[in-house]
Image (cartoon, rainbow, N blue to C red):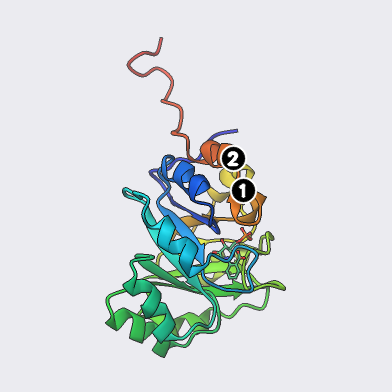
Amino acid sequence: MKEMEKQDLKVKICGMRDKENIQQLIELEPDYLGFIFYEKSARYVSEIQMQEIIKLNFGETERVGVFVNESVENILRFADQGFFDVVQLHGNESPEVVKSLKAEGLEVVKVFSVDDDFEAKVLNKYADVDYFLFDTKGKLPGGNGVKFNWDVLEKSKIKKPFFLSGGLGVEDMEIVKNFKSKNLYALDFNSKLELEPGLKDVEKVKELLKPPNPPAGGEFGS
Ligand SMILES: O=C(O)c1ccccc1NCC(=O)[C@H](O)[C@H](O)COP(=O)(O)O
């Protein structure tokens, strides 16, 4: 198996809350770490836990705050505490909510839950967002651990950079590289990299993020 070519695509790891586990992940330098502020999630991180987590040195890794139909007021209250750099809206948030958050200087990722009936025209209403994120439509708003049919996206010709999400694991890397859309910007990983909800398997993340092998016949090649 060939490892992820990190220079090609950004990587987001989502759904942690254990400080020691997060420190181990930071050392692997993912592009984004996502924190879920949705109380019904098995990966929910509380405000008190987050106040401790942000004492870690995240280096270049950006923090993403994940919300489901939360009020703008509450999102800003969390943002003001320095919990995250980017907001991920994982519910039915309106374009007006996006506008309000953008007006406060936040970077916004809007999530769309995809099944075979997905209509890409809904994206036109969200021209203000920085990124789209496409996740599988399932029983839960997120973290279902199931892939959707990526042909739906390939057909839709997405015009903004987007995160691909939903049931991604280390073993999917080869397939994802064949994804045709030039706007595929990042891959979002969650339940397939877990030991249990909220705790990531560091060995799996290491496998995902280790640098690619140098090409054969290079400086030290034969
Ligand atoms: O993961 C959750 O529990 C969750 C709950 C509610 C809203 C969002 C949630 N996760 C956000 C993510 O960005 C996940 O990475 C994404 O849904 C993919 O998860 P998975 O299918 O487990 O890889």
Viewer-nearest residue: 21 or 154: 21
Toward the top, the furthest residue is 222
Any mark on residue 204, and which?
2
- Give the residue displayed 34% in from the left and 65% down from the top: 85
Name the amino acid type tagged 2: Lys
Name the amino acid type tagged 1: Leu
Viewer-nearest residue: 74 or 214: 74
Q: Please identify the quarter of the rendering in which residue 136 is found.
A: bottom right
State the image coordinates of residue 198 (x, y, percent, origin top left): 60, 56
Instruction: Find the distance from the CA under tag 2 to the CA under tag 1.
Output: 6 Å
Viewer-nearest residue: 43 or 138: 43
State the image coordinates of residue 180 (x, y, percent, origin top left): 50, 56
Verify CB contact (< 8 Å) between mark 2 and mark 1: yes
- Give the residue displayed 65% in from the left and 56% down from the top: 197
Does 146 sit left or right of 53 as displayed? right
- Determine which residue is flagged by label 1: 193
* Sequence-earlier tag: 2 or 1: 1
State the image coordinates of residue 129 (x, y, percent, origin top left): 38, 76
Q: Secondary structure at mark 1?
A: helix
Q: Please identify the quarter of the rendering in which residue 7 is found.
A: top left
Does 169 sit left or right of 10 as displayed? right
Q: Badge 1: how crowded within 10 Å, few (<14), some, or many (20+)? A: many
State the image coordinates of residue 110 (x, y, percent, origin top left): 46, 74
Q: Secondary structure at mark 2?
A: helix
